[in-house]
Amino acid sequence: MRIIKRLLLGFIPLSLLAGCSPDVREINSIALVTITGVDYDEESKKMIITLYCNHTPSASKDVPNRTLEWIASASGDSILDAARNIRSRAGKQLIWQHDKFFIVGESAARHKLYEIIDYFNRSREIRMSGYLAISKGKASDILHLQSESGDLITNEIEGKVRNEHLWGKSINIELKDIVNYYTDSYRGFVLGKLFISKPINSDREVMILSGGAVINKGKLVGWMNANDVLSVHLLMGKKKWRNMEFVQSVPFHSDKVSLMMKIVKSNIYYKSVSGMPALTIDVKLKGTLIDTSGPIQFTANDALEQLEDASEAAMQKQLTASLSHFQHDMKVDVLGFSDFLRQYHPYVWKRTKPNWTEVYPTLPVTITVSASIPNLGMSQVLGGP
């Protein structure tokens, strides 16, 4: 009798394990949100949220387990309202914790960007390590495009982000860093720019990540071209250009030479000119000669030195033009000069802070570039005999 009782007691835990807990979610009952797009309709004053999701359908003998895409939009009086309303369209439970990318449409970025960032920061579901980019036009148009590679849109954007350090003409910032930028009302910053274009030798439009969106005082104020974004990388400091390399075309004699450039050092210094603040930015580069448009003879003693001088002049011209655009045209402190003065020269910042809007466009900034080309490879004659 005792043996029977023990056997019955042993079967009780097994019976409890036989059924699933009501808190357990089956994989085919959820949809992973991997991209969130936000737009704003100026006529209706409605926020529009578009989700790009991946989900796994229920398995059957005829249809094996496979991942599908699902894209849906919903509107609301606020982004929170729109996010709640889209759940009425979802036949599965939406999971935001795997969301890697957030795309804000141009209209939303110009009118509601602060509210959008604030919502992302407050929501416990949002992954703060995700990247945010601004789209020219609607974010929903980007999400409804077919990817150029035939892969999932999420994977394609992730690949573009990984390739940033190989050319330096796009910029990608995580949500947590954007929130930190928003606490500073004296400076602007640059986010990635997404747009739709038809590449060379292509018969359809695809998504392009290139250039930047300029944010100031909580909203989109303008666009930045790809070369200006490269200048931002070079002038902002090590966090932006760590492990980055880019191609620089240099006029040399009657030809053009392509160099693969890497940043060795980029430092900013303060000096006083007639009692007024002034800055100097020193950029040190190292290059490798890749190709040339014609035969160039480097056997002369000063030929390599001339190439280094030419590369320095070309880079200094580009950086100076970009800085002039930032200061005189946009009048937005995208490089964080105010941060530098606040951190390293607090007394100077205290004096200039009340009039920073007027001081910044006229702030004297000198850029110096030094470039070295350690070697040319096996041949001293490039492009032909």
Image (cartoon, helix red, strand yellow):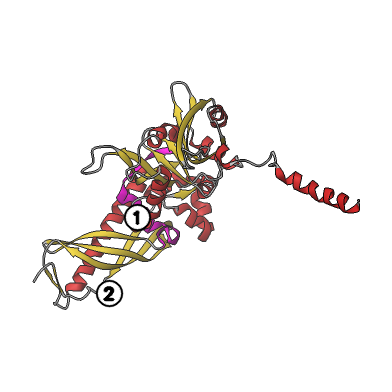
Q: Residue at x 53, y 25 (%)?
A: 76
The residue wearing badge 2 is 374
With 329 as the anchor, is 25 left or right in this view?
right
Q: Is residue 331 visible?
A: no
Where is residue 4 drawn, in percent x and y? 86, 50
Quadrant hosting residue 328: top left
Looking at the image, the residue that sits furthest to the front is 1
Looking at the image, the residue that sits furthest to the top is 44
- Give whichever of discs 1 and 2 has the lower sequence position: 1
- Say what secondary structure mark 2 lies in: loop
Q: Is residue 190 visible?
A: yes
Where is residue 11 drawn, in percent x and y? 79, 48
Question: Which residues make up the magenta segment?
Answer: 220-242
Where is residue 110 drawn, in percent x and y? 43, 34
Graded by Cα atoms within 10 Å as few (under 14), some (14 to 19) or many (20 or more), the crowding at tag 1 reads many
Looking at the image, the residue that sits furthest to the left is 385
With 26 as the anchor, is 260 left or right in this view?
left
Which disc, if any, is residue 168? 1
Where is residue 188 drawn, in percent x and y? 45, 46
- Circle 2: residue type: Pro
Is 16 or 304 nearer to us in this picture? Answer: 16
Is 296 or 236 nearer to us in this picture? Answer: 296
Q: Quadrant of the C terminus?
A: bottom left
Q: How many marks?
A: 2
Contact between marks 1 and 2 (CB within 8 A): the answer is: no
Is 342 or 230 nearer to us in this picture? Answer: 230
- Say what secondary structure mark 1 lies in: loop
| Chief SS of the magenta region | helix
Is 77 or 73 nearer to us in this picture? Answer: 73
- Circle 1: residue type: Gly
